[in-house]
Amino acid sequence: MPDNKVTNNITTSLEVRDLVMEGIFDGPRDLVFKAFSNSERLASWWGPSGWQTENREFNFKPDGVWHYCMRCTDEKQGEFYGQESWGKAVYQEIIVPEKIVYTDMFAGEEGNSAGGMPVTLVTMTFVENGGYTKLIISSRFASVEGLQQLMGLGVVQGCASQFYRLDDLLERLQQIG
């Protein structure tokens, strides 16, 4: 049975092994797509509020790797302050500016997959909608347990937080011209 709800600015639905999140962003599709396809832009907003992302490797092409580290830089986040979270994506398919498909995983500093953590196939679809962009992120997990594990880690709340950061970036970029 699907579980549909709205958390902050994203809508989520769960279907067996799939998590689908949708958000509407104030900006044309090309601009929103570049926030994911440009290393500097991506690092400027990726991760929850109070965390800073460093891209260790970023090859935005099929079979290319994005290896990154998110670090908590906000002292107000208590025990999270100073913690690191490493991730890795391997791009499968890229259709500019419509779609990005990649395998997503937790990783170590050397880029090796973190054992015991779920690996996810993520499909991002960018839909132009009159100056706005609808972003649909569909994450397919290998198992129901993998989906439940990430849900327990607060994946939806983390995405909502970083989408606010993406909103801020899009606003700044459009003011610049």
Image (spheres, rainbow, N blue to C red):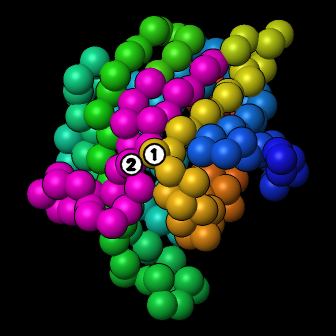
Query: How many residues crowd around disc 1 within 10 Å: few (fewer than 14), some, or many (20 or more)?
Result: some
The numbered dot on residue 142 is: 1
Q: Are marks 1 and 2 in contact (CB under 8 Å)?
A: yes
User: Marks 1 and 2: which is nearer the front?
Assistant: 1
Residue 134 occupies quadrant? top right
Residue 104 vertical placement versus 80 (above, below):
above
Give, as a three-letter code, the residue at label 2: Val
Give, as a three-letter code, the residue at label 1: Ala
The picture places residue 14, in percent across and down from the top left corner, at 73, 46
The range drawn in magenta is 101-126
So how many labels did they put on this image?
2
- Mark 2 or mark 1, which is nearer the start of the sequence? 2
Work out which residue is located at the far left of the displayed protein and give it.
110
Residue 18 vertical placement versus 6 (above, below):
above
The picture places residue 167, in percent across and down from the top left corner, at 68, 40
Query: How many residues crowd around disc 2 within 10 Å: few (fewer than 14), some, or many (20 or more)?
Result: many
Q: Looking at the image, can residue 121 be seen?
A: yes
- Residue underneath mark 2: 119
Q: Is residue 69 magenta?
A: no
Q: Residue at x 26, y 62 (%)?
A: 114
Judge left or right: residue 61 versus residue 137. left
Residue 10 vertical placement versus 125 (above, below):
below
Q: Residue at x 61, y 20 (%)?
A: 125
- Secondary structure of the residue carrying tag 2 is loop
Residue 43 occupies quadrant? top left
